[in-house]
Amino acid sequence: MAKDFREYLVEVSRHELFGRVFKELAIGSKVLISFQASNAHGCTPEETLDDVYAYTQWEVSLRATKPAIDVPRAGAWDFLKHNYWAKPFDKPDFQRAMTAVNIPTSHCQQILEDVIEYALLKKQLESEDDIRLIEADEEVKKYTKNAQTGCSGCGGQKTIKTKPE
């Protein structure tokens, strides 16, 4: 069982009119989950609470990098759409994410676990420890263990010419 999704939540901003925004969870190199709850989101209670454990329902969005989440036979939604929690999700016109409001907390936890399962199956994630937090709407770049050294594999290797001594 995955860590409670609320333990991942990190507040990015809070505004009286626009509500609070939490960072998104990058599950591997492709799928992102956004759990939101504030006075500007479809949640219960529909107010901005300091205690995230006081919410019983959440606004949830799922999106993916190439391909988009809902591309038939290629997007993650083909794998996820058969789950009991998926029925209220929709992708509004001109949006990049599948979104649903008033999703029960227990369903949110299952969404996280199902997306982790998908990412592990597709080898986009090695373990739950590799889940990253990113700013809302930030694009995800593929994570590699060599990211700190700048190595992008043999295909990205540059030949450095040196002067003879």
Image (cartoon, rainbow, N blue to C red):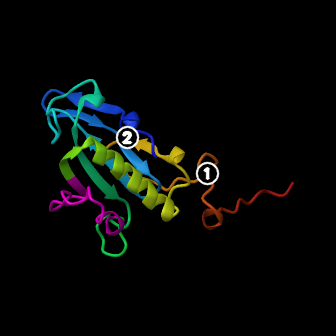
Can residue 120 be found in the magenta stretch? no
Residue 11 shown left or right of residue 148 in the figure: left
Q: Nearer the viewer, residue 45 or 99?
A: 45
Label whose residue precedes the other's in the sequence (1 or 2): 2
Where does the image place residue 11, in percent across and percent down from the top left?
Answer: 32, 31
**Alpha carbon of mark 1 to alpha carbon of mark 2: how far?**
24 Å
Residue beneath the point at 17% across and 61% down:
94
| Label 1 crowd bin: few (<14), some (14–19), many (20+), radius 10 Å | few
Residue 83 shown left or right of residue 131 in the figure: left
Q: Secondary structure at mark 2?
A: helix
Can residue 80 be found in the magenta stretch? yes
Where does the image place residue 157, in percent across and percent down from the top left?
Answer: 65, 62
Where does the image place residue 2, in percent across and percent down from the top left?
Answer: 45, 45
Say which amino acid is labelled 2: Phe
Residue 145's tag is 1
Q: Quadrant of residue 13?
A: top left
Q: Is residue 154 above or below residue 134?
A: below
Q: Quadrant of residue 53?
A: top left
**What stretch of residues is rendered in magenta?**
77-99
Count of numbered badges drawn on the protein: 2
Q: Main secondary structure of the magenta part?
A: loop
Q: Nearer the viewer, residue 26 or 153?
A: 26
Please say if the residues under marks 1 and 2 sit with CB atoms less than 8 Å apart.
no
Residue furthest bottom in the image: 73
Can the viewer see residue 138? no
Residue beneath the point at 15% across and 32% down:
45
Instruction: Say which residue label 2 marks.
Output: 5
